[in-house]
Image: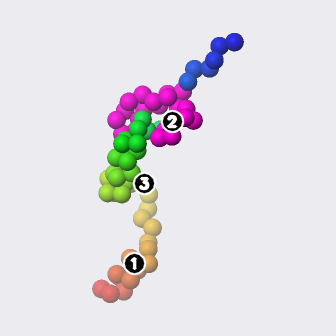
Amino acid sequence: MSKPATKTVNCPSCQKEVAWLEENKYRPFCSKRCKLIDFGDWAAEKHIIPGKRVSTEDDENQETLQ
């Protein structure tokens, strides 16, 4: 019986093909570098999750001050 084919995905940062294996601690990224680049993009708000903005306590305080 043959082994099932290893699933591959494209790294979200560099698009390099990556094997989806448990040994790859950076999956779905190909490397620590690509993982950190993506994390930095989220921190810099270059990525957003679409949807309605959720009001925070600070937003409510700003409205009160105006």
Read off the residue under disc 1. Answer: 58
- Residue neighbourhood size for the residue with mark 3, other residues' Cα within 10 Å, grouped as few (<14), some (14–19), many (≥20): few
Residue 5 placement: quadrant: top right
Mark 2, mark 3: which one is toward the viewer? 2
**59 shown above or below 22:** below
**Residue in the image at 39% along x and 51% along y:** 39
Kind of residue at disc 3: Ile
Please identify the residue farthest to the bottom as the structure is shown: 65
Q: Over which residues does the magenta segment extend?
A: 7-27
Q: Quadrant of the N terminus?
A: top right
Name the N-terminal-most of marks 2 and 3: 2
Query: Alpha carbon of mark 2 to alpha carbon of mark 1: how far?
Result: 40 Å
Residue 34 placement: quadrant: top left
- Residue neighbourhood size for the residue with mark 2, other residues' Cα within 10 Å, grouped as few (<14), some (14–19), many (≥20): few
Q: Secondary structure under badge 3?
A: loop
Main SS of the magenta segment?
loop
Query: Alpha carbon of mark 1 to alpha carbon of mark 3: how far?
Result: 20 Å
Name the N-terminal-most of marks 1 and 3: 3
**66 shown above or below 49:** below
Kind of residue at disc 1: Asp
> How far across and how far down the image is residue 9, in percent?
47, 31
Badge 2 vs badge 3, beta-carbon distance below 8 Å: no
Read off the residue under disc 2. Answer: 24
**Residue in the image at 51% along x and 40% along y:** 25
**Residue in the image at 62% along x and 20% along y:** 4
Kind of residue at disc 2: Asn
> How far across and how far down the image is residue 32, in percent?
40, 42
Is residue 2 rendered to the left or right of residue 40? right
Mark 2, mark 1: which one is toward the viewer? 2
> How far across and how far down the image is residue 49, in percent?
42, 54
Read off the residue under disc 3. Answer: 49
Query: Alpha carbon of mark 2 to alpha carbon of mark 3: how far?
Result: 26 Å
